[in-house]
Amino acid sequence: MVRNTQQALPREISFQSRLCSALAREDGPTLDILALGVVSAGVLRSWSVLDPKDLAFLVTVAAAGIATLLWRRCRPASYARYRELPAVFLRVAAAASPAAWKVTAQALNGTPPYGSSWPLNAAAFGLAVLFSSFAATGGVMALARPVRLWLHVPAQAAAMLLIAQRNPDICSTAMFQHPAAQQATAGAYAALSSLLHLAAAPMDTLSLQHGPQGRCCAVLGLAEVLGGFLAPTLVLAVTESRLFAAYHHSWKEQEKCQQAERHGLATGASGAAAHPPSSVLQTPSRLAVHCYQDLLRWRPLEPADWTVAAATAVMLLASTWGLLLLLTPPGR
């Protein structure tokens, strides 16, 4: 009887599988618990303005949160593998839902918390912009339930575009119609518009004149671009680049070990490759190496580089603001 002595081939592990596992470890129950709390508070506070479709959506979100908690608890391997598509779907669905807007409008149409103190008014206005633009919510959803960049970028962009369509309605609420809010909006608008000369903006942009509604929409749009899209995207890009650097280093060490084993076999050394590994790291593609090491690699800045980085950031801010002004209809 002949015994089959053929050794099983080691299982290959790709960077994408390692990345999925690493991001899944960062995905805790925080977002689901927050979602349940926000949905419960929204239903209780805005019951009178919600129709059956809105209630059905909020109940579905709550049920999805409970199902996700159970899925993660009972089938962690399955959750780590398949969690990304439901995550991005829920992110876009929440941005597109009229129910989320009605709950937000109910809060913004309450008594504005402005007074005679300028610092307190500025803080209240800043918080109103942060939360009504969904910049904070979008950032939390992206970082509390991280997905790979190729899924995150289109999903987050779609979510922010859907939310931006509500900016005129948000600016019509009592929170932003208050004189203190309009004064703060005008100040932010003027300060940001002063940067346009640094970015060599076209004369069409410099000559634009927006009313209170247009100024408010532009400020909210900037919060959505910077806080809702750019900030979480940069965090995820740095995370992925660091994970790839660790993977690439491990792959290089694996290559060195394999070369040493082949050299030992060639010279007749005993014990070489006596116990082959059960898994090996897959060779990273040239495209992945180029993207992560050349484009997304995080490099600590030298003291002399900070000035260049700050100037570049100001130029990008001015360019973004100019584009938002062009997209905001004048005269509003």
Image: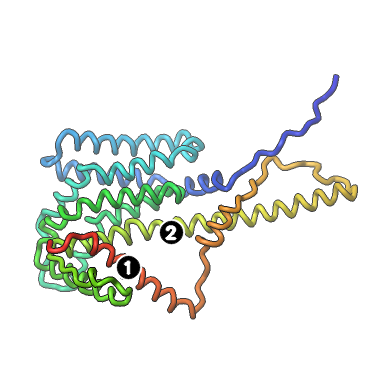
Type of amino acid under label 2: Val
Please say whether residue 127 is visible from this viewpoint.
no
* Up/down of 190 relative to 72, above or below: below
Q: Which mark is residue 195?
A: none
Residue pointed to by mark 2: 235
**Residue 255 appears left or right of 208:** right
Type of amino acid under label 1: Ser
Quadrant in the picture for the N terminus: top right
Rendered residue at 31%/65% (across/down): 320
Residue closest to the eye, 74 or 84:
84
Rendered residue at 38%/49% (across/down): 154
Residue closest to the eye, 62 or 165:
165
Please say whether residue 197 is visible from this viewpoint.
yes
Rendered residue at 80%/26% (across/down): 4
Residue pointed to by mark 1: 319
- How far across and how far down the image is residue 251, in percent? 66, 52
Count of numbered marks: 2
Q: Quadrant of residue 231?
A: bottom left
| Element assignment for label 2 | helix
Q: Residue furthest bottom?
A: 304
- How far across and how far down the image is residue 152, in percent? 41, 49
Q: Residues within 10 Å of mark 1 (few under 14, many from 20)?
A: some
